[in-house]
Every structure is written in structure tokens, then in C-alpha cells.
Image (tube, grey):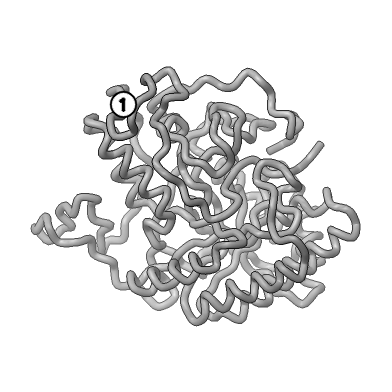
Amino acid sequence: MTSSSRRRSTRVWTMGVTAALAATALVAPGPATALPIPALPIPALPQIQLPSNGSLGTVDGGDNGSGNGNVPPVIPETPSTTLPYLVGARASYTGNVERMLGATGDASLKARLQDLLKTPVAQWVGGDGVPEVTRLVAEGTAKNSVPVIALYHIPDRDLGSHSGGGAPNAAAYKQWIDQVSGAIGPGKAVIILEPDALPQTPDLSATKQSERIDLLAYALTKLASNTGVTTYLDAGTAGWRSATATSNLMKQIANKGASITHVSANVSNFKSTAATETYIRDIATAFGKPLKGMVDTSRNGGNVTNGEWCNPAAQRLGQLSDVIFTPTSDMEQVFVKTPGESDGVCGVSQKTAGTFDDALLLLQLGIAEVQARTAPNPRRNAAAPR
């Protein structure tokens, strides 16, 4: 059984306008600008709790509480350690949602898409993404907000599966981390460090295991020198590695001199928020010190069963409790996985990993059913608890 991950972007994707839903039975192939989306019953959007002293505003510059519909959204005043998450960090995703918004005349779907444009989503950064880090940090500074950046460039990434790749060797990875740290400088950022890298470690050779532990320790130590950065070491998903096994790997990293204070979990996965928070607390207990947690809620609003990992039909967008980052909070929530982004040519999507899929986003919104591919994915044992 391979433990490689399901999903996602292998680098900073430059995505063009995709063909709209032509791969589904919803509409016939045609230009994206002419996308007719049926008016079907639409469940309510996940509710985002907004701060009482501010507003996210509306996509079209609507009323923000001032009585002037042309006034831009207000960013609330916050303490220096607490900031709104940066919205619109992933430009390619925002562009695709805006394209779908302009192509539909359905008022309910428009409202759903407009809300997605106000929802913070992480930007994934691979080997060529250092300039993107510079841009994100500068944009966050200008907007008094904090970007969420998933660093995804570890050697032997995803164990060669759908999101395989990464740095060619340990030296190149350390150099890349140095460049990322330099790009952030004194700015602020929330870092999700190498999704799946830690729980995949036992599936590497003994030599590669030692190298990976060393590289994660190096990255944590280097990023700790950036005073405005909060780094969440990714700890995998509830039901994959046990809390004890995960904490033992973390102890090996700590023995290298790295400090671990924050962990992320459920990145690109489907476990409930409650189960994920319990998993994080269990890790902290086994690790022997308090840990702050980050839960990826981007796809845990449905009822995906164990063993399904690659574009499952039951996935739905999850909920966010708020859109404000509080470093001292025991548990934070954010959309780490990009809505509408395929895990690979498998399940209900014919798109390659990291590619935006209109039909998949409609499925995640609960608007359309999409038929699963009949051919099984040969890269993963379906019994894997992912």
C-alpha cells in the first residue's frame, strides 16, 4: 500500500480558462463565456462569521454598512498579532471563479460564487514560486492581511504519485527554503509546511527517512528566523498515521533542534473538523507539549468514506468559523486545498492534478452530480485510510 497523497497542485499553477463542464452531461461543449448553468436547488453556503467591527464587503463593491454602495470593503482594525487572512491570494483560482460568475445568469449560483471570492484560500508554492512568495507578502502588507502559503517542494514529493516532483536533492531544497525565507523577510505569512511529507516519511528508505527529517527540521528552524511567520508543520490526516506515530516523527525533528509549536491536518482531505481537532490534540498529548492546530476545511462538508481520496463524488465544501488569523488560537481553520481543483485523472474528474475543473466546483457546491470514472486508479490501494 502506498501512502502517497491524493490531490493537488504540484507547483504555482498558471491556469488558463478551461472548457466549461464539457466533460459532464450538464451542457454541450462550447465557449466558456457562454456557459449555461442550470437553475437547480442550491444548498446554503457555509456561513462565515464576520468580525463585528468590519465587513468583507461584496464582490461588486456593494454596501459595506456605510450606506454608500460604491465604498470598498472595510478591513477591521486588529491587534498586531491578529490579521484577516488575505483574500484572492490564488489569482488563477479567482480568475476561474470570476469567469463562471460572468457566464451564469442564475442569481443563486452568482451569490454562491461571489461568496467564494470573499473566502481566503491558500496559495501553493513549489520550486519556481519564490517570486510568488514575494508578491503575496507584499500584497498582505498593503492590505493589512496575512497570506496562507503551502510550501510544497520536498524531495520525493508525494512519493512519485499524482503530485510527484519536488527538489532534486537535499542541498537544492535547503537553498530553496533559504530563498523563501529571504522573500518573506520581515513580512507576515502563515506557512503550511510540506503537506503529507511527515506522514509519508515511513514509506521512504531508511536513508531517505533520515534526510526528510533533517530537511523538515531545517525548514522549521530557518522559517523561525522570520519573526512575522507562523509555521504549521503538516501532520497528515486523522486515520492515516496514529497520533503516537506522528508524534514520534515529530520528536525526531525536535531532536534536530527544531521547535514545533503549530501543526496542520486534513490538508486536501475530507475528515470532519471535530475528528481532525481530536487528532491534533492527541498528537499534542503524545508529543508532550501544547500544539496549536490548523484544520483544512475546504472539502470536509460531505460524507466521504475511508479509502476514497482522489476526487470522490461525496465531497462538498466545508465551513469556516471565521476569516481572521489568530496565532494564539488553539485551532484555526482555512481553505488550504483550492476549491474546484482536481486531485488527478480519477474519481469524478478528468483533469490532471492541480487543474481547475468547473464541474468539480459545482459538485462541491452541491449543485450538480458528476459520474465517477469507471476505471480504478492504479496508484492507490482503495483500502488506504485516507
Residue 71 position within the rendered picture, expressed as x and y whole percent measured from the top left: 14, 61
The kind of residue tagged 1 is Ile
On the question of residue 285 being in view, the answer is no
Whether residue 370 is situated above or below residue 237 in the rendered picture: above
Whether residue 7 is situated above or below residue 199 in the rendered picture: above
Residue 57 position within the rendered picture, expressed as x and y whole percent measured from the top left: 23, 55
Q: Mark 1 highlights which residue? A: 37
Residue 107 position within the rendered picture, expressed as x and y whole percent measured from the top left: 22, 33
Whether residue 381 is situated above or below residue 155 in the rendered picture: above
Q: Quadrant of the C terminus?
A: top right
Q: Quadrant of the N terminus?
A: top right
Spot the residue most to the left.
67
What residue appears at the point 31 percent right and 26 percent down from the top-left corner?
37
What residue appears at the point 70 percent right and 61 percent down from the top-left corner?
167
Residue 162 position within the rendered picture, expressed as x and y whole percent measured from the top left: 66, 41
Structural crowding at the residue carrying mark 1, measured as other residues with C-alpha within 10 Å and reported as few (<14), some (14–19) or many (≥20): some
Spot the residue most to the right.
206
Question: Observer-nearest residue: 276 or 168?
Answer: 168
Question: Observer-nearest residue: 241 or 136?
Answer: 136
Is 59 situated left or right of 296 in this image? left
On the question of residue 252 being in view, the answer is yes
Quarter of the image for residue 364 reads top left
Question: Observer-nearest residue: 158 or 278?
Answer: 158
Is 27 situated left or right of 164 in this image? left
